Image (cartoon, rainbow, N blue to C red):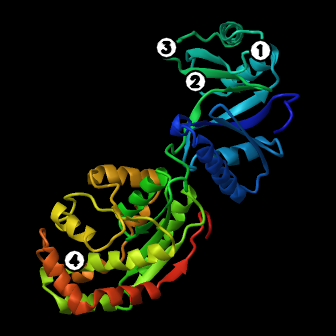
Amino acid sequence: MPLAPAAGEPCVLLKLGEIVLKGKNRHQFEQRLQSNIRKALSSTGVGIDLWQRSGVIIIRAGSGLAEDVEKVARRLEDVMGIVIVHRAQRVPKDVESMTEAALEAVAQHPMSARGGSFAVRPRRRDKRFPITSSEIGISVGSAINVKFGLPVNLKTPDITVSIEVDRDEVFVYTDGAPGQGGLPVGSSGRGLVLMSGGIDSPVAAYRMMRRGLRVDYLHFSGMPFTGPESIYKAYALVRELDKFQGDSRLYVVPFGKAQQQIKSAGEDRLAIVAQRRLMLKTAEIVAERRRAGALITGDALGQVASQTLVNMTALDDAVDLPILRPLVGMDKIEIMDQARRNATLAISELPDEDCCSMLAPRRPETAARIADLRQIEKRLDAEELAEQLADSVQEHRPVYGSD
């Protein structure tokens, strides 16, 4: 932990969410989050000091430069497990220093020039500090009122000045940027995402990362009967999603020849469901090799004709691993809004030749019978075919921010 500041210095103050509600294993979640923070910040090239107290993580840049602190803050907005990212001033534990920092924060706030109202929210975590929270609020608030002439509004202020008295220093800040919330990636195990080039599966991946899963990605390409465009899209999507976890792996399976076999092995209306079952069987093998405990898909109930409850049950029958469907109760507008926030929507909307379109019948089956699907798989020798497909995977490592 760094020494108490001799003068005000910029730092980042991170507020945690549901991690603080954990019981005896809370320390494990906190350690995982700290590890993820250090890993994410390694890409910025900024040396940091990090320490934690009472559900708050404090980070200072080794250089002490404001521009380095801003780099750190922006990168941490994408780290799962953080609710709010505050750009703060770290000052000595005296009223004069905290008042000076508060005046500076108000002067830099855009609402101060517009005559906006303000409130001071002091919090004395260190109860040994001789000045009470109320006394801090009155003293600092009076100084702000005298210098800027702004009105006080304790209920709905335009500017909120927060002052937190900690063990060795005081933190002063105004607004915070929202973090991703949720749980630290890796705290809930590992999953494998069936990644198409569409809108849904990247959002499904995001939602499971937010629940603490570290995910790998498996993409089925129509090669050799389609071009590489879908692979480029999958790569770009995983590279964008990599900002939430780092060290992402994308596995690509050339699936075109297997699709031809499916087409000649069964009824046209069952082709889509039979294809999905073969994908899941292949994914299960890849997942076991990666020690993943679940498969993840972008299925949303009723979104397309084949995504019915009966068909989902038929898909579950294909594998032993659990299939997680985090989008199952969401509509398309909700999914698109999340994709837009994740910066994956524009990538997903790029044109490509999806391998699923090669088998799309005029009227897909909405109530596939498991017995019929098993008959198709018997003719295909689906278990052996899935092994061959899993053996053919090509591994890629997209890195967020790379060209």
Gap between marks 3 and 4 measured at Cα: 56 Å
356 left or right of 86 in image: left
Dot 3: element: loop
Q: Secondary structure at mark 2?
A: loop
Q: Nearer the viewer, mark 1 or mark 4?
A: 1
Q: Amino acid at mark 4?
A: Ile
Q: Are marks 2 and 4 in contact (CB under 8 Å)?
A: no
* Mark 2, residue position: 111
Mark nearer the viewer, 3 or 2: 3
Give the residue pinned by disc 4. Answer: 272
Which of these two is toward me, 203 or 325?
325
Q: Amino acid at mark 1?
A: Phe
In the rendered image, the quadrant that contains the N terminus is: top right
Between circles 3 and 4, the one closer to the viewer is: 4
Nearer to us: label 1 or label 2: 1
Report how far apart the C-alphas of labels 3 and 2 lie in the structure. Answer: 16 Å
Spatial separation of the CA atoms under disc 1 and disc 2: 31 Å
Where residue 151 sits: x, y (%)? Answer: 57, 9
Q: Amino acid at mark 3?
A: Lys
Q: Callout 2, which amino acid?
A: Met
Mark positioned earlier in the residue sequence (1 or 2):
2
User: Where is mark 1, residue-wise?
Assistant: 129
Quadrant containing the C terminus in the rendered view: bottom right
How would you rate the neighbour count of disc 3 (Cα within 10 Å): few for under 14, some for 14-19, many for 20 or more? Answer: few
